[in-house]
Image: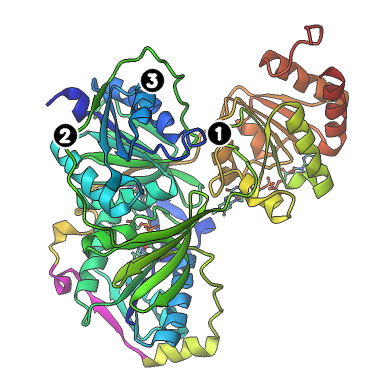
Amino acid sequence: MNKTFGGVWIFGDYRDYFQNRITLQLIAKGRELAETLNTGTTVVLLGDQIHQYAMEYVAHGADTVIVADHQNLKEYEVEKYTTLLAQWVKSYQPEIFLAGATSFGREFFPRLAKRLRTGLSADCVDLEVDPESFLLVQTTPAFGGELLAEVVTPDRRPQMATVHPGVFRELPHNAESVGHIIYPEVDVFPEPRVKIVRSKPQRTGKVSLEDASVVIAGGKGLGSKEQFELLYELAELLEGEVGATRPAVLSGWAGEDRLLGQTGKSVNAKLVISIGTSGALQYITGIQGAETVIAINRNPDAPVFRIVDLGLVADAATVLPILLETLRRRL
Amino acid sequence: MNIVVFVKQVPDVPNIRIDEQRMTIIREGVESIINPLDCVALQASLELREREGGCITVISMGPPQSEEALREALAAGADQAILLTDSAFAGADTLATSHVLAMAVSKLQPFPDLLLCGMQTIDSDTGHVGPQIAEELDLPQVCGVNEIHMDGHLLVLKRLSEGFLDTIRVPLPALLTVSKDLCPVKNLSLGAVEAAFSQKDIIRWAAHDLGLQPDEVGLKGSATHVRKLRPPADRTGGRIVTGSPQFIVDALIHKLESMSILDEEDGNE
Ligand SMILES: Cc1cc2nc3c(=O)[nH]c(=O)nc-3n(C[C@H](O)[C@H](O)[C@H](O)COP(=O)(O)OP(=O)(O)OC[C@H]3O[C@@H](n4cnc5c(N)ncnc54)[C@H](O)[C@@H]3O)c2cc1C
Ligand SMILES: Cc1cc2nc3c(=O)[nH]c(=O)nc-3n(C[C@H](O)[C@H](O)[C@H](O)COP(=O)(O)OP(=O)(O)OC[C@H]3O[C@@H](n4cnc5c(N)ncnc54)[C@H](O)[C@@H]3O)c2cc1C
């Protein structure tokens, strides 16, 4: 069998394409893994009239895209997708199969792994090929993020994992890239038992923390809603978004859609400025994808300083107004 | 409507310790609780039984002390409890766990109409077990349900998925995993707990009762292995700055400039 088929597979989730970058992040990581294994990266793409996405995936680094383009596959449905992908896995035999830990990924990947009688790890924050055993080392948070577990699937294939959105960085679009796009024959499917009769968007604002390049994150240390509001101004001046820790959300200073961390969102930003946050592990999970982290905390021993590139020991209430004033003058 | 609720006994997370040899958690000496979302599922089953009639069976796979979780469930109002316990079950991943749980369900007479799981646990938190039981039993599944209604023989459900509120119809029998928004959990009264201790028996099944071979279950029947547990890594090389507020602000501005997030002071803007 062609080695590009046997290699690293990625579930192509094209929904909400411009917001949801998980597939592109997985392609970038997939290429890295595939290189170590001397194989290729394949995206499997299921849907109706989705050719354009196949081209996008090639431009972002996929060697091969296997497409099932069928009107019957328009909706993301656990049973249909499981049946089709199980057939493909059996015929092409990938080594590794990754999906984003989105609601859908977390609902259908376990079912697929079970049908294939193989192992699956959940919501991974890191993936790496062990240079000796060539096994995929899947790092997943356990016990509320207190510990990381390294999970391996020694004997069964494929080695499957869902991956936390935002922990890997996508490759830039390259229109020159070449790749194979394959359209295998697709059977018609029986009607699914689970019928989604209505789907209503619940998004409140347009908070897109995952895609912001600057994130200003505030914690309980800001002390009040009024202080927290200053972060919006700072974010505006730096063209960023505002994120919050769990206690800040619980205090009503920010909406749930701004929550960062294990139970919230993960950033993929160039810069996070974390203000008045202690640096609990569950929170750090959400900001460790940033290239640079700066923290402001008045306690020099705050754990957050262990993970920063620049730590500023200061009272946020004093420093924020001066900072805003300085920035306003300059911009 | 006959309902099965799967309950897992979990350690009260902040107090865990790890067995470095076997790479599993040491449960002894740590307070154990019912996984919080399983309490939500149980509460929902009580409300459904009140409307639709039927019988609630709670099932747990775990070491002998998981009996406490089942006793609590009985006290809360479950009709029957089954403990799946066998030293061969230890160290199971979700593939092996779901196998044992599914085999136990297939022994039930009559086959249940509705199977309820938590959407995930607070300890290993994979969320795999529900969908994997559904797969083995060839049942439809819906994850993260926050509303359950009946319309004739169909379940009408709501759940949040990817920022959308889905309304879903699914025929029985079906498996659902529940989110915390499904219903508030009422506290069990101590009197009820004592009553459960004295009254109902717990059914115990080991591997051979389920017709399972030792290599299908536990560590041997698992596809994944936890190779290592470790604390999250720290970033290194960070610079910590103290000083007057103006000095702090200058240090920050300088960093923003060096990252090209701000233009240099004397630049063109
Ligand atoms: C299972 C589980 C999941 C969780 N998931 C999440 C999650 O997804 N996201 C999340 O955020 N949390 C989560 N948490 C909670 C997490 O453990 C922490 O409690 C939380 O992140 C702490 O938030 P904080 O830093 O805002 O508050 P605190 O821990 O109270 O820290 C406040 C900090 O501000 C500093 N400070 C105080 N005053 C000032 C001042 N004037 N100027 C500067 N600094 C000041 C203090 O020194 C302190 O370090 C979770 C917990 C559990 C158990
Ligand atoms: C650190 C660590 C990491 C792990 N990583 C993985 C991994 O990546 N992949 C993997 O396959 N396994 C993994 N495991 C093993 C996994 O934790 C066990 O299989 C566990 O029994 C079930 O997984 P869960 O707690 O994640 O259940 P979930 O799937 O999160 O549980 C969902 C629901 O299923 C029901 N349920 C789950 N377990 C039981 C039970 N024993 N009895 C009754 N009902 C139950 C409950 O209703 C529960 O709310 C890991 C274990 C540890 C300790």
Which numbered dot is residue B127? none
Residue B209 lies in magenta, yes or no? yes
Q: Residue at x 35, y 89 (%)?
A: B200
> In the rendering, at what x and y percent does residue A119 appear?
26, 46
Residue flagged by tag 1: what amino acid is it? Gln
The chain that hosts pointer 1 is A
Are discs 2 and 1 less than 8 Å apart at CB? no
Q: Nearer the viewer, residue A147 or A189?
A: A189
> In the rendering, at what x and y percent does residue A13 appear?
39, 38
Task: Please name the residue that numbered disc 2 is placed on.
Answer: A92
Mark 2: C-beta under 8 Å from nearest atom of ligand 2: no
Task: Please name the residue that numbered disc 1 is placed on.
Answer: A288
Residue flagged by tag 2: what amino acid is it? Tyr
**Label 2 vs label 1: CA separation?**
35 Å
For the residue labelled by badge 3, is the local secondary structure a helix, a strand or a loop?
helix
For the residue labelled by badge 2, is the local secondary structure a helix, a strand or a loop?
helix
The chain that hosts pointer 2 is A
Task: Please name the residue that numbered disc 3 is placed on.
Answer: A59
Going from N to C along the chain, the mark reached first, 2 or 3, is 3
Between disc 2 and disc 3, the foreground one is 3
| A1 sits left or right of A104 in the view | left
Q: Residues within 10 Å of mark 3 (few under 14, many from 20)?
A: many
| B244 sits left or right of B149 in the view | right
Going from N to C along the chain, the mark reached first, 2 or 1, is 2
Which portion, as a residue range, is magenta? B200-211
Q: Nearer the viewer, residue B27 or B153?
A: B153
Q: How many marks?
A: 3
Q: Are marks 2 and 1 on the same chain?
A: yes
Q: Residue at x 40, y 15 (%)?
A: A175
Q: Is residue B267 above or below residue A173?
A: above
